[in-house]
Amino acid sequence: MRISVDQTKCCGSGMCVLTAPDLFDQNGEDGTVVLLEEYPDATCEATAEEAASLCPASAITIS
């Protein structure tokens, strides 16, 4: 599994951080998403997919 984020789409809602704090953080300056783990292990797949589905800007992609 690979997680990618598009910071230009991010609106800074923080849903990703609330859902998966081990995978995402927010930039202290503008609140945009910061990806902490691009290739997490399989145990994080459900959480990563939930975070992607909750993102109001569709800035998170799971492949």
Image (cartoon, rainbow, N blue to C red):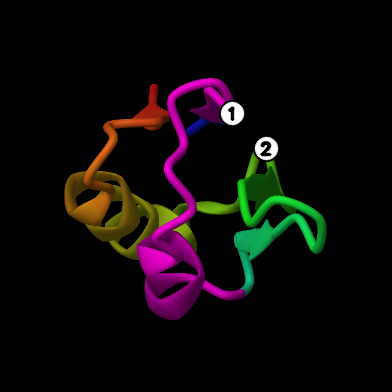
Q: Nearer the viewer, mark 2 or mark 1?
A: 1
* Numbered badge on residue 7: 1
Of residues 54 and 38, the one drawn nearer to the viewer in this rendering: 54
Of residues 45 and 3, the one drawn nearer to the viewer in this rendering: 3
Q: Earlier in the sequence, mark 2 or mark 1?
A: 1
**Which amino acid is tagged 1?**
Gln
Q: Quadrant of the C terminus?
A: top left
Q: Residue at image x 55%, y 27%?
A: 4
Residue 56: x %, y % from top left: 22, 45
Residue 9: x %, y % from top left: 43, 25
- Residue 31 appears left or right of 18: right
Please say whether residue 60 is one of the residues in the magenta stretch. no
Residue 1: x %, y % from top left: 48, 33
Q: Is residue 22 above or below residue 38?
A: below
* Numbered badge on residue 38: 2
Q: Look at the magenta stretch and give its main secondary structure.
A: loop
Which stretch is magenta?
A: 4-21
Q: Is residue 21 above or below residue 32?
A: below
Q: How many marks?
A: 2
Q: Residues within 10 Å of mark 2 (few under 14, many from 20)?
A: some
Q: Residue at image x 39%, y 60%?
A: 13
